[in-house]
Image (cartoon, rainbow, N blue to C red):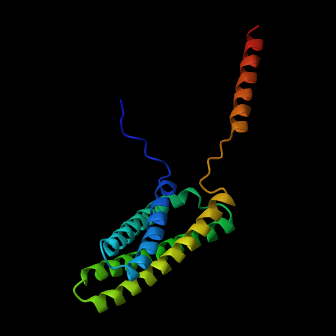
Amino acid sequence: MNFLPAIPDPLHPALVHFPIVLILLGTITSVLAVFWRKGYVPAFAAALLLLGAIGAWASVATGKSDGGLIENTSVGVEALLEAHENWAERTLTAAAIAAAMAAASVALFRFPRVERGVAVAAAFAAMVAAWMVYETGHRGGALVYQHGAGVNTTSATTVLETSAVAQSSESLKERDRD
C-alpha cells in the first residue's frame, strides 16, 4: 500500500501557486510591518518573503525542466514562453532581494531608525516582486488559457471515438471469423 501521494507530472503547475500566494501575503505583511513594528509582524513578513523566494526558485527550476513539453510549437507560443521565463527569473530576483531586506530589517531591531528605513525599502521591494508575480502569471495564464500549453489534450470525445473505433474493429474481426 502506497501512502505517499503521486507526484504531479508536470510538476511546475502544482508548485507555481505557492510562491504566488507567499509573495503576495509577504508584500501585504511587509507593508503592515512598516507601520506596526511590534510583535512578530516584521519576522512574519520576512519569513513569508523568504518562503516565497524559495518557492519562486523551485518554480523557475521546474519550469525550465517542464518547458520542453511545450516548446517547438508555434512561433507565438515560443515567444510567450520565453517572456514568461524571463519574468519568472526577474520575480525570483526581486523576491530574494525583498526577503533579504525584510530579514535585515528584523536583524536591525536595536537601531529603530535604520530598521524602519530598511523596512520601507523591503516593503517597496516586495511590492515590486508582487508586480512581477502579476506579470509572470499573466504570461503563464496566456500560455495555458489561450494556447493550451500543458493542458491534457485527451478529451472525453477522443476517448469515446477511440472506444468506438475499437468496437468497430472488433465487430469486423467477428464478421471475418464467420
Residue name at image x 46 percent, y 73 percent: 28
Residue 168 x %, y %: 76, 23
Give the quadrant of the N terminus.
top left
Residue 88 x %, y %: 50, 71
Residue name at image x 28 percent, y 88 percent: 112
Q: Is residue 64 above or below residue 28?
A: above
Residue name at image x 36 percent, y 76 percent: 99
- In the shown orientation, is residue 170 left or right of residue 20? right
Q: Is residue 169 above or below residue 146?
A: above
Give the quadrant of the C terminus.
top right
- In the shown orientation, is residue 13 left or right of residue 106? right
Residue 56 x %, y %: 43, 67
Q: Is residue 49 visible?
A: yes
Residue ranking furthest to the bottom? 113
Q: Quadrant of residue 29?
A: bottom left
137 vs 70, nearest the viewer = 137
Disc count in the image? 0
Q: Quadrant of residue 157?
A: top right
Residue name at image x 42 percent, y 75 percent: 95
Q: Is residue 33 above or below residue 77?
A: below
Q: Quadrant of residue 42?
A: bottom left
70 vs 137, nearest the viewer = 137
